[in-house]
Amino acid sequence: MNYAIIGSGEIGTALARAFARKNIEVAIANSRGPKTLASLTEELGPSVFPRSVQDACEAEIIFLAVPFTAHPDVAKQFKQWNGKIIVDTTNVFHVAPEELGGLLSSEIVSKAFVGARLVKAFNHLPAAQLGTNPPVKGQRQAVFLSSNDADASATVAAVATQLGFAPVELGRLDRGGVPLHVVDGQPGGILFQNLVSLG
Ligand SMILES: NC(=O)c1ccc[n+]([C@@H]2O[C@H](COP(=O)([O-])OP(=O)(O)OC[C@H]3O[C@@H](n4cnc5c(N)ncnc54)[C@H](OP(=O)(O)O)[C@@H]3O)[C@@H](O)[C@H]2O)c1
């Protein structure tokens, strides 16, 4: 399978709904195991597959939808991250700034998934707003992406388009991507901006 979501909480479920809406196959995993995902996957339909974390990590593109503090645990549950794309949806609202050591949260996540290519995306909206798709015909909800790997960013942007969003690529994490992060406890300027594309 090409896609997996690790985390079946608010953001994981919002993402799974976006995949289900377009009938694109995706695996979903949580910390409690696939049996606990039965009612969710039944509700979302046949394109969403409950998996263990280890099985889900076989996917090429993995949406990390767990609390920031859980990312090291996910990273150590799989050995071969080389070449995979990690889409980091995490925000650090409840993490003391000093714990980040002056780095952006996605720079820290990136270090944990050795060999993977990280794309920061799908983190800028409350889950209830993400993927609701504006009801006005012709409008697509903007999602913002930032990565130090331009190819990975373009790949995830293409997935976002397939899912019905309007991707906006911001460039490197420490440049265009800074407003997509919580820095010193403060949300960057792009967080909570629910923008749409008319194109
Ligand atoms: N909620 C939002 O509106 C929102 C918006 C933007 C970004 N975010 C970010 O998205 C991330 C997820 O937030 P959320 O609100 O969706 O959280 P949540 O509702 O608390 O769900 C967290 C999910 O992560 C899973 N999980 C935790 N530790 C794990 C581990 N070690 N291995 C595998 N799965 C693990 C949990 O598994 P179990 O179900 O088994 O407990 C749960 O399914 C956070 O980093 C948050 O900052 C959230």
Image (cartoon, rainbow, N blue to C red):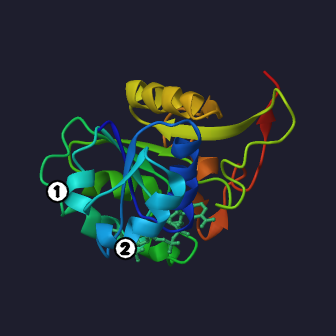
Q: Which residue was labeled with disc 1?
A: 78
**Viewed as shown, does residue 129 lie left or right of 16?**
right
Residue sitting at the far right: 136
Which quadrant is home to the C terminus? Answer: top right
Give the numbered dot on residue 103: none
Considering depth in this image, is 25 or 93 the residue closer to the camera? 25
Amino acid type indicated by mark 1: Phe
Q: Residues within 10 Å of mark 1 (few under 14, many from 20)?
A: some
Residue 10 appears in view: yes
**Residue 67 shows in the view:** no
For the point 49% across and 50% down, the residue is 45
Q: Earlier in the sequence, mark 1 or mark 2?
A: 2
Foreground residue among 185 and 19 = 19
Q: Residue at x 49, y 36 (%)?
A: 172
Ligand 1 contact, mark 2 (Cβ < 8 Å): yes
Q: In this rendering, is residue 63 above or below 6?
A: above
Hey, which residue is sitting farthest left in the picture? Answer: 79
Q: Secondary structure at mark 2?
A: helix
Residue 56, given in percent of the width and then of the height, sits at: 27, 52
Give how far apart the Cα atoms at labels 1 and 2 are. 21 Å
Residue holding disc 2: 36
The residue carrying pointer 2 sits among few (fewer than 14), some (14 to 19) or many (20 or more) residues within 10 Å by Cα, namely: some
